[in-house]
Image (cartoon, rainbow, N blue to C red):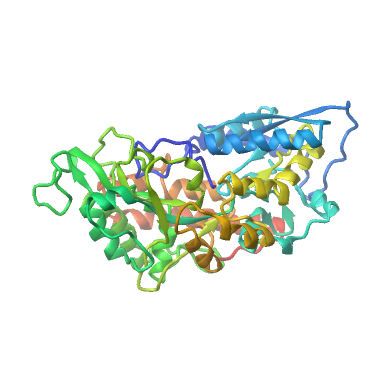
């Protein structure tokens, strides 16, 4: 999905499990890419240069072992039918975005990248990505064949910068074994946020077996948490379920200083520091909290988690409901070609294969594209899924799906850094209980407003209209 969720250890789950936190290290260097790039922002694709009978393209991937297996097997199948193109898979699951930016800045960018939807627009706006529009028009592919929320976030105005691959929905995953052990009913679509807190407190245990509702519970010696703490990155769903939004409808200004929004962020911080349902940076425990290791009972993740290969018995449901109902979010990471690619035409051929029926069908079989981004494949394949057991919930919720906040602006990775965890210490202070949301969020809102003002100008450059 939007990042290396599948590969990263969750040693501190109040962080979104990202490997892109080092993006600022390469940020300044990346500024030179726009100047040296052979891509013009008018989107005209370069003509392919005649080459020898075999061309080797470098393909930088991410996503962990499940994704790597898919990409290697897909490349082998593609090469069998296209022997003139050889593909070198280059997995990069640690600091993916930093690595990509460094290679771009150094003029050694790969030919093809499995990118992330929380850095696509910012890379495109800097001229670091190849505009695929000309390739797309010549291919005869139709935008109407794709699910709108999968294809639209790959575009800025009329400029296409990626094809969606692993479209998936944010879900609440749960460990059935831990619920059974506690004699608790599994989460379902009836759950409210109050239910979530009440049950997850009972599933948080210290080393004496006491849960978080016990007055003698010791938060310094937790051995099992009720939740992973993923609301710090998926707070979109919380806000929307309460009838709130992070920004104005035209993305011209944030609403993060709205007292009602501030109260929701305080509640997220209280989950770890008051209710003890998830890890908190205030109390480092030195433990890798992970669904696959059986030490967290619920986790805010996505339908793509099927590729994790967890050995525990688990299932899925939607996010809890608020006073405005349930919010649903889905997102798709895309396949993109850097502006400095040595072999853009050949890279497009493999990109097109991956992003159309052959590659997406295979990605579904491998648990990578849990929601095929092509409408006809979604209708055909999704009803056949057997894992998790309640997969049908995804089908039922899909028509209601919105986008993550970072897909609604251009400065995606910068906004994500400020609003999740980053070199900016504000949100970490909030989640560590070192400051209140009333103290932190107005300051954060001012930072975000400055970014959104600049994004409005960037949008005009691409003929794009930003909106919720």
> From what the image shows, is residue 114 above or below residue 143?
above
Question: Taking the image as drawn, is residue 148 in sight?
Answer: yes
Say if 293 sits above or below 466 in the image. Answer: above
**Residue pictured at 84% horizontal, 31% vertical:** 84
Q: Is residue 230 left or right of residue 434?
A: right
Residue 424 quadrant: top left
Q: Nearer the viewer, residue 76 or 324?
A: 76
Position of 402 with respect to 178 (left or right) is: right
Residues 124 and 353: in front is 353
Task: Determine the residue positioned at 35% across, 36% down.
Answer: 11
Pick whichever, 249 or 284, lies toward us: 284
Find the residue positioned furthest to the left: 216
Viewed as shown, does residue 257 lie left or right of 161?
Answer: left
Q: Where in the figure is residue 245, as x and y percent of width and height?
A: 45, 66
Q: Position of residue 27 (x, y in %)?
A: 57, 36
- As drawn, which residue projects farthest toward the bottom? 324
Please count the marks in the image.
0
| Residue 327 image position (x, y, % from top left) | 45, 66
In the rendered view, would you say 182 is above or below 397?
above
Query: Can the viewer see residue 5?
Result: no
Q: Position of residue 306 (x, y in %)?
A: 49, 47
Q: Quadrant of residue 102?
A: top right
Residue that lies at the very extreme toward the right in this rendered image: 50
Q: Nearer the viewer, residue 189 or 60?
A: 189
Q: Quadrant of the C terminus?
A: bottom right
């Amino acid at each position: 999905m939007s990042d290396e969720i599948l590969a990263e250890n969750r040693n501190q789950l109040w962080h979104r499990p990202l490997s892109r936190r080092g993006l600022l290290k390469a940020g300044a260097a990346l500024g030179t890419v726009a100047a040296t790039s052979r891509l013009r922002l008018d989107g005209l694709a370069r003509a392919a240069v005649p080459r020898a009978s075999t061309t080797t393209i470098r393909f930088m991937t991410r996503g962990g072992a499940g994704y790597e297996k898919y990409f290697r097997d897909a490349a082998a199948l593609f090469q069998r039918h296209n022997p003139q193109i050889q593909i070198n898979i280059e997995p990069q699951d640690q600091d993916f975005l930093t690595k990509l930016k460094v290679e771009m800045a150094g003029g050694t960018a790969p030919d093809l990248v499995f990118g992330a939807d929380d850095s696509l627009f910012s890379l495109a706006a800097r001229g670091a990505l190849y505009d695929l529009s000309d390739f797309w028009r010549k291919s005869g592919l139709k935008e109407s064949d794709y699910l709108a929320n999968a294809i639209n976030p790959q575009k800025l105005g009329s400029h296409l910068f990626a094809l969606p691959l692993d479209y998936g929905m944010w879900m609440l995953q749960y460990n059935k074994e831990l619920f059974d052990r506690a004699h608790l009913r599994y989460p379902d679509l009836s759950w409210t946020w109050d239910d979530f807190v009440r049950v997850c407190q009972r599933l948080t245990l210290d080393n004496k077996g006491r849960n978080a509702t016990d007055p003698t519970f010791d938060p310094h010696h937790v051995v099992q948490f009720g939740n992973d703490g993923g609301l710090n990155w998926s707070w979109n769903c919380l806000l929307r379920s309460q009838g709130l939004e992070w920004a104005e409808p035209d993305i011209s200004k944030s609403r993060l200083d709205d007292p009602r929004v501030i109260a929701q962020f305080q509640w997220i911080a209280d989950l770890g520091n008051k209710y003890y349902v998830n890890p908190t940076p205030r109390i480092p425990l030195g433990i890798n909290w992970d669904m696959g290791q059986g030490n967290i009972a619920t986790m805010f993740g996505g339908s793509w988690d099927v590729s994790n290969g967890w050995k525990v018995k688990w299932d899925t449901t939607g996010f809890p409901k608020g006073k405005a109902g349930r919010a649903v979010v889905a997102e798709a990471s895309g396949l993109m070609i850097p502006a400095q690619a040595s072999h853009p035409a050949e890279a497009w051929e493999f990109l097109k294969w991956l992003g159309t029926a052959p590659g997406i069908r295979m990605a579904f079989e491998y648990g990578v594209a849990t929601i095929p981004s092509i409408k006809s494949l979604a209708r055909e394949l999704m009803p056949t899924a057997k894992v998790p057991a309640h997969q049908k919930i995804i089908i039922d919720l899909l028509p209601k799906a919105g986008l993550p906040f970072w897909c609604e602006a251009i400065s995606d990775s910068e906004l994500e850094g400020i609003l999740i965890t980053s070199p900016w210490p504000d949100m970490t202070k909030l989640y560590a209980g070192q400051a209140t949301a009333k103290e932190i969020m107005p300051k954060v809102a001012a930072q975000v407003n400055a970014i959104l003002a600049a994004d409005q100008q960037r949008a005009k450059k691409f003929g794009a209209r930003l909106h919720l």
